[in-house]
Structures are given as C-alpha cells and as structure tokens.
Image (cartoon, rainbow, N blue to C red):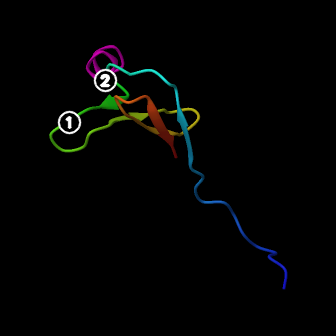
Amino acid sequence: AKFLDFKIQNMVGSCDVKFPIRLEGLVLTHGQFSSYEPELFPGLIYRMVKPRIVLLIFVSGKVVLT
C-alpha cells in the first residue's frame, strides 16, 4: 500500500533549556503573544504568528512546541 494523498497536520517538539524561566516577566514583556494564568494551567502559552507555532513554557525550563 502507498500513501499518495496526505498532508502533515501537526508536529510536536520539546526541549529543556536547563534553567528556570520567570513566566511572570515573560508575560509582561511579551503580553501581546502570551497568556499565563497559573491558577488554570501551570505553563505560559506563547503564540507565535510567523511561523505559526504555539509554545508551552514552564517554570522548570521545559518547553513544548506544536
């Protein structure tokens, strides 16, 4: 069987920057692209426009890109 007609819908990556990230400071300086509500979700959600990528950034230094 061959896949002749397909497209990639989503890709996910992750990394660890190996240092803590001050999410409060990040949302203050990049508020246009980010939202951080720690009582709802522990990570900062950063939405890039070009390229269209969403990053979940955590205080621990872990980052998930999708």
Q: Is residue 45 above or below residue 5?
A: above
- Residue at 59% in and 35% down: 51
* Whole-percent x, y for residue 41 in the image: 24, 43
Q: Is residue 27 above or below residue 46?
A: above
Q: Say if the magenta span includes residue 24.
A: yes
Please state which amino acid type lies under the numbered disc 2: Leu
The reply, left or right, for residue 36 in relation to residue 56 is left
Q: Which residues are magenta?
A: 23-31
- Residue at 38% in and 30% down: 60
Q: Earlier in the sequence, mark 1 or mark 2?
A: 2
Question: Which quarter of the image is occupied by the N terminus?
Answer: bottom right
The span from disc 1 to disc 2 (Cα, nearest Å) is 10 Å
* Whole-percent x, y for residue 37 in the image: 20, 35
Q: Say if the magenta span includes residue 65.
A: no
The residue tagged with tag 2: helix, strand or loop? helix
Q: Nearer the viewer, residue 51 or 61?
A: 61
Q: Residues within 10 Å of mark 1 (few under 14, many from 20)?
A: few
* Whole-percent x, y for residue 46 in the image: 40, 33
Q: Is residue 2 above or below residue 60?
A: below
Pointers 1 and 2 in contact (C-beta within 8 Å): yes
- Residue at 60% in and 60% down: 9
Q: Nearer the viewer, residue 3 or 64?
A: 64
The residue tagged with tag 1: helix, strand or loop? loop
Please state which amino acid type lies under the numbered disc 1: Pro
> Principal SS element in the magenta part?
helix
Tell me the residue that label 2 is attached to: 23
Tell me the residue that label 1 is attached to: 38
- Residue at 45% in and 34% down: 62
